[in-house]
Amino acid sequence: MTTTIIITLCTLLLIAYLFDYSFKKTKIPSVILLLLLGWLVRQGTMLFELKLPDLSSILPILGTTGLILIVLEGSLELELNKSKVTLIKKSFLGALAPLLALSFLMAYIFEQYGGYTFRDSLINAIPLCVISSAIAIPSVRNLSTSNKEFVIYESSLSDILGVVFFNFILRNETFGVDSFGMFGLQLVVICVISFVATIGLSFLLSRLEHHIKFVPIILLTILIYAISYVYHLPALIFILIFGLSIGNLNELHNLKFFDVFRTDILNKEVQKFKELTIEATFLIRSLFFLLFGYLLETSEILNTTTLVWSVGIVVLIFILRALQLKLSNLPLKPLLFVAPRGLITVLLFLSISPINNIGIVNKSLIIQVIVLTVLVMMFGVIISNPEKAEEEQKKAAEEKEKEEEEQSTKAV
């Protein structure tokens, strides 16, 4: 039995790698194929009457670990310099404004239609409003650099803001000066913890000479997140600060304080750490969606009762996204289509206690919204002709370089 499980896991993960590797040609997001593969495995176990233990309790563990690694991977990719200020502002507004607008609008609709309390309606609406960086980032690798950077910033910030917003609503029965004051204090505390922890982890990363150094850093990162979460702190902010700090050492090298880290050595170690994080993220993300697909019931996927709601929610998502992109003076094509729901949506949905659950938002609705938004993204990426966009961007960059050279020559 042990050998069979090992063979099965290795085979499934290798297939998951092929899904990811073939995306450039097929344009089919790996999450769709992983869910389908997991569902097919479930049908196979039922066909051959194989008895497996209940695996549903593993899903939140994989989801939380995946969330940490995804945010860490995304923050390591982000660049902080003056040239990125405009992009960061647009990405932040692009992540925050639709999250708030869509959450409150959907909460109002749920409240009016089902007669639920506004708080419960909001708790159930938020998971459907978070863009999944786990799906968005790998799916835009063929887009132009500017579009790809926007998606990386926007989806990473959407994950963090969505989780922080969700936990704030979930943990407060009422909202007033006390709740917002406590939230402000929690932000200050987590920022202090993040600063101290980042210094400590960076020091370890630059000074550890043992042949095993990256796994302890990742484990300490997850441990600090978990402890912070236990004390109701916005723990993802620590992951963001840590990733941004070590991923942007070039912007901090002028500060004498950072000489103690031997930044020349640390830069090399950070690159290796980044590569390990990417590989670990792929592994956990693949296992999560495979297991989620395995746990799906066919009746949940084909639930026609929730399909009307799912389509309505997806239409609303893309209407608001179109408005947001227009207001930010960003191109509709292909960014309009890149608003997938995924791991964060599932993880937040699983975090809702039965007391706060509302009938409209169920497993069928969640999976249908995920599949529909991913399909929209897939077709949007296919018709956007990313290769042509990349060529146009390269030409524009070359022309800009020529102009700068000419200006510098004239100045001399």
Image (tube, helix red, strand yellow):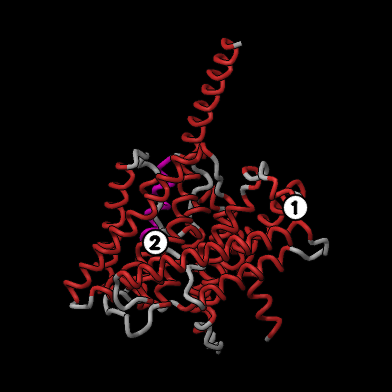
Above or below: residue 351 compared with residue 104: below
Q: Residue at x 51, y 72 (%)?
A: 38
Q: For the residues marked 2 and 1, what is the alpha-carbon distance in whole angstroms?
A: 39 Å
Q: What type is the residue that disc 2 sits on?
A: Val
Above or below: residue 235 compared with residue 199: below
Q: Residue at x 33, y 54 (%)?
A: 97
Report the disc number at residue 404.
none
Residue 119 coordinates in the image, percent (x, y): 27, 74
Q: Residue at x 71, y 81 (%)?
A: 3
**Closer to the camera in the image, 326 or 201:** 201
Query: Which residue carries the number 1 mark?
Result: 260
Query: Mark 2: which secondary structure?
Result: loop
Report the disc number at residue 130.
2
Quarter occupied by the C terminus: top right
- Magenta includes 375? yes
Q: Residue at x 42, y 48 (%)?
A: 91
Residue 386 coordinates in the image, percent (x, y): 47, 40
**Closer to the camera in the image, 309 or 107:** 107
* Quadrant of residue 9 within the rendered picture: bottom right
Residues rendered magenta in the picture: 371-384
262 sits to left or right of 125: right
Q: Earlier in the sequence, mark 2 or mark 1?
A: 2
Q: What type is the residue that disc 1 sits on?
A: Val
252 sits to left or right of 86: right
Residue 360 coordinates in the image, percent (x, y): 26, 75
- Magenta part, dominant SS: helix
